[in-house]
């Protein structure tokens, strides 16, 4: 008698007190067909490529925004800006140290006026923070 037949015979005899079949064959799932595996891999690859494309597009947009924002900031402070965030018409600039942040706070109205002339984002306020 083969192993499969033995397994089926023994599994069919397993019952619980409630009469519910808890046999191994009840939990057995069929193996996916090789074609369906290929389709799953292909779909995953396409999804990853589209996600990667979206990420690259977002990075490209953020890079263009960064270039425009950095043009409005005086040259001596440009290297101190580590990152920025633009949400809800509010621009948040992150700097490396508190001294630069203070200097930028003094001129933030000028920066805001220059960005408003560009008129791309409708920025209403600028917040300057020190990155910890």
Image (cartoon, rainbow, N blue to C red):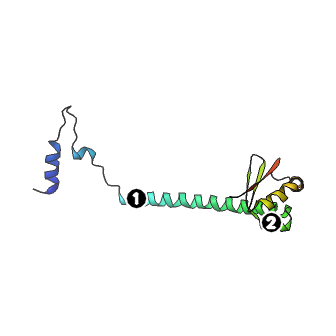
Residue at the location (84% across, 54% down)? 105
Q: Nearer the viewer, residue 101 or 62?
A: 101
Residue found 18% across the figure and 38% down from its top: 15
Left or right of 39 on screen, residue 109: right
- Residue 37, disc: 1
The C terminus - image quarter? bottom right
Q: Is residue 23 left or right of residue 65?
A: left
Residue in view at x 59 percent, y 61 percent: 52
Query: Quarter-wise, where is residue 110 in the image?
Result: bottom right
Task: Specify the quadrant of the image occupied by residue 39.
Answer: bottom left
The kind of secondary structure element at disc 1 is helix
- Towards the viewer: 41 or 115: 115
Which numbered mark, 1 or 2, is in the foreground of this view? 2
Q: Residues within 10 Å of mark 2 (few under 14, many from 20)?
A: some
Indicate the secondary structure of the residue bearing disc 2: helix
Label 1 vs label 2: CA separation? 51 Å
Q: Is residue 126 above or below residue 74?
A: above
Q: How many numbered marks appear?
A: 2
Please provide percent x and percent y for residue 69.
Answer: 81, 60
> Would residue 49 be visible to someone looking at this image?
yes
- Quarter in which the N terminus is drawn: bottom left
Q: Identify the residue position indicated by label 2 in the image.
A: 78
């Amino acid at each position: 008698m083969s192993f499969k037949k033995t397994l089926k015979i023994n599994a069919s005899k397993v019952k619980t007190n409630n009469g519910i079949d808890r046999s191994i064959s009840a939990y057995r799932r069929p193996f996916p067909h090789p074609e369906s595996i290929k389709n799953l891999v292909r779909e995953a690859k396409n999804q990853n490529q589209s996600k990667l494309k979206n990420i690259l597009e977002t990075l490209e947009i953020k890079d263009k925004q960064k270039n425009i924002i950095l043009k409005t900031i005086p040259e001596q402070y440009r290297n101190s800006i580590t990152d920025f965030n633009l949400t809800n018409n509010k621009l948040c600039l992150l700097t490396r140290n508190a001294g630069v942040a203070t200097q930028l706070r003094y001129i933030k109205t000028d920066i805001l006026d220059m960005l408003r002339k560009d008129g791309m984002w409708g920025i209403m306020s600028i917040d300057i923070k020190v990155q910890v």
